[in-house]
Image (cartoon, rainbow, N blue to C red):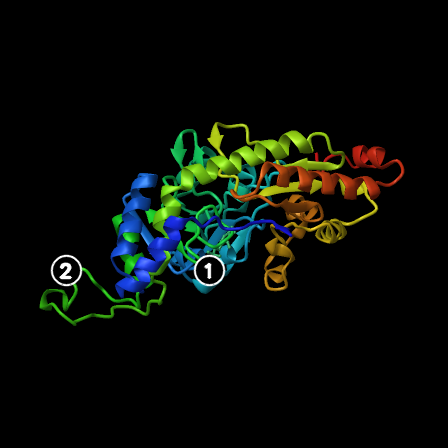
Amino acid sequence: MIPYARPSIGDAEVAEAEACLRSGWLSTGPRAMRFERDLAAFLGVKHALGASSGTAALHLAVLAAGIGPGDEVITTPMTWVSTANVLLHAGARPVFVDVEPGTLNVDCARIEAAITPRTRALLPVHFAGQPCDEDALAAVAQEHGLKLIEDAAHALGASYRGTPIGRFGDATMFSFHPAKNLTTGEGGALVTDSDEIAARATRLRFHGIDQTAESRFGGRGAGAYDVVEAGFKYNFTDLQAALGLHQLARLDALNARRARLAEQYLEQLAQVPHVRPLERAPYDHVNAWHLMVVRLEVEALTATRFEVIAELKERGIAPGLHFVPLHLQTLYRPMVEDPSRLAVATDAFERILSLPLYPDMTDDDVSTVVDALADVLARRTRAGGAIAARRAGGGAA
Ligand SMILES: Cc1ncc(COP(=O)(O)O)c(C=O)c1O
């Protein structure tokens, strides 16, 4: 089976994990601190805080940015459920704004219409590793006094007009889940230039214990601790860092391999009818190529997207599905006043699948996937399919 994602673990990661196990430091210790320093230096940010998962890091980011009960936060429906769940955990309400048809990133031109007096922040997601329009996001955030919290789970190593993703938001989250561009097993990080956000997130990350010099017990030394609010157990461990240190050292090479594989996909998919990759955003950027999302011209086919996925699985290829949009989930459906305003995301959901993309894939694997997809689609093209797709015009265009 060729899976949609697979971590690339080298000998250095294995050796470091073994050294960590033998060191006695399994929880947060010197390796975790070194990883945080390396990540901050890699991105050019002041603070990088490791966390037990990307979801945990985003929860910390939202709380440390001051989001709380009654607040509204504008986000995208085209994301993993953590993006909105952490807002509910903070007592806030996610407000979904539709995506652009070409990139499936949030449509910045539609954000302003969703702003109310309760809006406190924007929470964009760099879908599949392609950066959102940071200039447009910053302009709206500044104009309306909103915080910018970024879900960059897919975008480690991406950049926008020459600046790394991670430097734009008041706080930015990365995920180190095994499918991601850098993995620590499970894990994530919050990065920020704000001392205030970093201090609050540090406290919330470990039970709400104040570890600063000003804390009540700070001066007393060994063993004393002071709990100042009800925090979480979201700390990042040395065993996670053992993987992360070497994944980070290899990240540029891993991402370059992803980009090369993506180029091959784009070249080969151009010859296959009824499938379209995402479009390249018009501004200067570097895509982290976390996912190879494509859209089917379902009007031309006798198979649904689910059936195409099933038929690929029969041929030894396991595509992913990113994502079932949040406004179609039982939990979030009642929170959406007018689903017709999310028509682009709803339409995209019928068409999308994620083809395998991971650094250890071979060039031949790409051809195997494209040939299998071409074969499935050719067998499932309806009579007059091309005309039907043209007439439907748009969805996948
Ligand atoms: C867009 C997005 N946001 C948030 C997350 C959550 O990250 P994690 O799985 O590390 O908690 C993920 C990945 O799973 C994701 O794809």
Queried on whether the Cβ of the residue with tag 2 lies below 8 angstroms from ligand 1, the answer reads no
- What residue is disc 1 on? 86
- Say which amino acid is labelled 1: Val
Query: Residue 138, position in %: x, y?
Result: 42, 37
> How many C-alpha atoms fall within 10 Å of the one at disc 2: few (<14), some, or many (≥20)?
few
Q: Nearer the viewer, residue 152 or 273?
A: 273
Residue visible at 72% across and 39% down in the picture? 371
**Residue 93 appears in view:** yes
> How many C-alpha atoms fall within 10 Å of the one at disc 1: few (<14), some, or many (≥20)?
many
Direction from residue 98 to residue 38 in the image, left or right: left
Pointer 1 or 2: first along the chain: 1
Secondary structure at badge 2 equals loop
What whole-number distance in Å separates the C-alpha atoms at marks 1 and 2?
Answer: 30 Å
**Residue 137 appears in view:** no
Query: Residue 18, position in %: x, y?
Result: 34, 59
> Is disc 1 in contact with disc 2, using a CB cutoff of under 8 Å?
no
- What residue is disc 2 on? 213
Query: Residue 228, position in %: x, y?
Result: 25, 68
Direction from residue 76 to residue 198 in the image, left or right: left
Displayed quadrant of residue 267: top right
Secondary structure at badge 1 equals helix
Q: Nearer the viewer, residue 166 or 4?
A: 4
Query: Residue 257, position in %: x, y?
Result: 50, 36
Residue visible at 60% across and 32% down in the picture? 264
Residue farthest toward the left in the current orientation of the protein: 220
Direction from residue 25 to residue 8 in the image, left or right: right
Residue farthest toward the right in the current orientation of the protein: 383
